[in-house]
Image: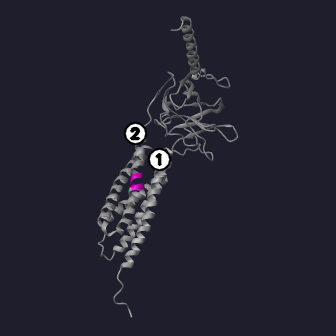
Amino acid sequence: MGSPLFNISVLGFTSLILLQQFSFSYSLTCTSQKFSGRREYQQCNDLPQLSSYIHWNYIESRSALDVAFVAPPVTPRGWVAWAINPYSQGMVGSQTLVAYMDDKDKMVVKTYNITSYQPTPSKIDLMMLELEAEYVDGLIKIYATMILPKHLGSTVNHVWQVGPSGMDGMLGKHAFGSENMNSMGKLDLVKGEISSYAAPGGELKHKYLHGILNALSWGFLFPVGVIMARYLRTFDSLDPAWFNLHVSCQVLGYILGVAGWGTGMKLGYESIGIEFPLHRKIGIALFCLCTLQVLFALFLRPKKDHKHRTLWNFYHHIQGCLIVILGIVNVFQGLSILSPAAKWINSYTLILYILLGIAIFAEVVTWIVYCKKRSLRPANPYPSA
């Protein structure tokens, strides 16, 4: 055992370190932050996500709000944003202040009325009296003075976010991690209290479900079904097994595709103002084309010896290829919208390359079998004179 003097010394040294760490962490809270221009704020709070802080003065009789938002950008030229949403919780409808450093190392602050996932600078539904920003010690600080609509009262929905720099004046897409998806809540301007509400996790689950269903149906099962019909029918021993596999694959793909299409319609209904026109139009076209394909194949397919069977086969093959192409294109459209981890995009791309490799190999085998069958056909016993 050590001497009492040594133990006391160790205890004192440890306590000093803990005290210094506590003081350091405390210095990072909103109460210790200083601002240029002799700005002072009566209220402040440490926001629960993205290492962000909010400071404000509020004159209730005039609905006047003087606010400072502080956050570290994710990259040196990344952007930070703070918004009030007068209409609902979440991003859509947010009246947003966005600040970032431009290519000339000058701070820029703009207003955005968020109505889609590709926002552009626009006027907002708040009366702005002052708006500026600065970059200090790795933090972007947005200063704003505004008059709030009377109907909002003293408790408002607010949203904050950070993201990378973009191209051609566009904002880079922010991450979809837990902190980014939960950076929202209520702000009581009079009591100085903040409260969080969880991001609509159900909506995010619907997005992933929508993506999985459509990638599995349009992006995988339909191409597999086409490969089966194209190449397995070459082998007489696989008839009618190839046909049953083809039908099963396409019907299952259609069922999953309709389910995915339905979740997409639900997402569109729940996300008013957020639109992806090309993705939606391709999805509607796929649903219509595939419905016709399934109905015609199950109920309007002529018999093999029917005089219109050749024409029907041509239509069926062309429309099937069109469905596969549009399906794959729309899967990648969806991936670009959802922005999942790169491993998911790479995995789906790898699956497509594997299917392409199988198709090329099967095409070669099919032609070899076809040429052999043709060479074994008996010659015409009654050649023309």
User: At 60% across and 35% down in the image, what residue appears?
Assistant: 73
**In this view of the protein, can residue 281 be seen by the observer?**
no
Question: Whole-percent x and y of residue 245?
Answer: 32, 60
Quadrant of the image for the C terminus? bottom left
Q: Are marks 1 and 2 in contact (CB under 8 Å)?
A: no
Q: Is residue 145 above or below residue 115?
A: above
Q: Nearer the viewer, residue 99 or 112?
A: 99
Q: Amino acid at mark 1?
A: Trp
Check residue 305 for magenta coloring: no
Characterize the local packing of mark 2: few (<14), some (14-19) or many (20 or more) Cα atoms within 10 angstroms: few
Which residue position holds label 2? 202
Which residue position holds label 1? 344
Question: Whole-percent x and y of residue 148?
Answer: 54, 31
Q: Is residue 306 left or right of residue 166?
A: left
Residue 301 is labelled as none
Q: Main secondary structure of the magenta part?
A: helix
- Disc 1 secondary structure class: helix
Q: Counting residues from the N terminus, which is met first, the one under dot 1 or under dot 2?
A: 2
User: At 49% across and 49% down in the image, what residue appears?
Assistant: 346
Q: Nearer the viewer, residue 85 or 119?
A: 119
Q: CA distance from mark 1 to mark 2?
A: 21 Å
Q: Identify the residue at the far top of this view.
A: 4
Q: Amino acid at mark 2?
A: Gly
Q: How many marks?
A: 2
Q: Is residue 335 left or right of residue 315?
A: right
Magenta region, residue range: 215-220
Task: Tell me the mark number nearer the camera, choosing from 1 and 2.
Answer: 1
